[in-house]
Image (cartoon, grey):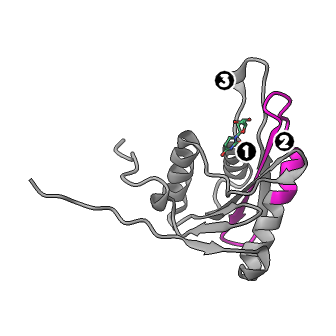
Amino acid sequence: MTSKEIKISYQEYETLDQLEPKDKELAQAAIEATALAYAPYSKFNVGAAVMFEDGVIVKGANQENAAYPSGICAERTALFYASASRPDKAMAEIAIAAQQNGELVERPVTPCGACRQVMAQYQTKSGIPMKVLLIGAQKIWKFEKVDDLLPLIFDSI
Ligand code: THU
């Protein structure tokens, strides 16, 4: 038997102003995208913004449905829209933010497992690491690749 360890590292920032300009622009797009949420049930408005390698940004937000499982998260809305609108372009980064009661949530929003899996596949499709920026009112976390949020990614087929 051999014991193994997986190390995950990420950067923590206190304010948007500490981010490099492109990251700040993407973070602001994710915050803006929270206004696009349709979340009448949870009232948890999530916004996501995907930046392509060429700097183009597309936004998505969570879309809920009375048949709850038919709704979809902000991240997948943005990622599917990004791939469907610019199928041959590489995605380089995704930022995620959420508002509750009209305010940015304090702790950075951490994506659900299904969204991490979808991010992982678009990272593979793009052929470059996809950075992930998780925005909170108090802290911002930056991951250099999806693997840091989803170690041992399923990619066997
Ligand atoms: N949600 C997202 O859009 N992204 C996340 O990372 C977490 C959860 C949505 C799904 C649902 O519309 C609402 O937030 C409450 O779970």
The x and y percentages for residue 74 are: 73, 45
Question: Which picture quadrant has residue 67?
Answer: top right
Q: Amino acid at mark 1?
A: Ala
Question: Which residue is at the far left?
Answer: 1
Q: Earlier in the sequence, mark 3 or mark 2?
A: 2
Q: In the image, is residue 43 above or below residue 50?
A: above
Query: Which residue matches tag 1?
Result: 74
Secondary structure at numbered mark 1: helix
Q: CA distance from mark 3 to mark 2?
A: 16 Å
Label pair 1/2, CB-CB below 8 angstroms: yes
Q: Residue at x 68, y 48 (%)?
A: 75
Q: Which residues are magenta?
A: 31-56
In the image, is the residue at mark 1 within 8 Å of ligand 1 by its beta carbon? yes
Q: Residue at x 40, y 55 (%)?
A: 151
* 139 or 50, nearer to the observer: 139
Q: Amino acid at mark 2?
A: Ala
Q: Earlier in the sequence, mark 3 or mark 1?
A: 3
Q: In the image, is residue 129 above or below residue 71?
A: below
Quadrant of ligand 1: it is: top right
Q: Amino acid at mark 3?
A: Pro
In the image, is the residue at mark 3 within 8 Å of ligand 1 by its beta carbon? no
Q: In the image, is residue 93 above or below residue 111?
A: below
Report whether 50 appears left or right of 131: right
Q: CA distance from mark 1 to mark 2?
A: 8 Å
Residue 69's label in the rendered image is: 3
Magenta residue check for 22: no
Magenta residue check for 41: yes
In the image, is the residue at mark 2 within 8 Å of ligand 1 by its beta carbon? yes
Query: Which residue matches tag 2?
Result: 37
Q: Residue at x 87, y 57 (%)?
A: 32
Quarter of the figure that contains the C terminus: top left
The x and y percentages for residue 146 are: 51, 59
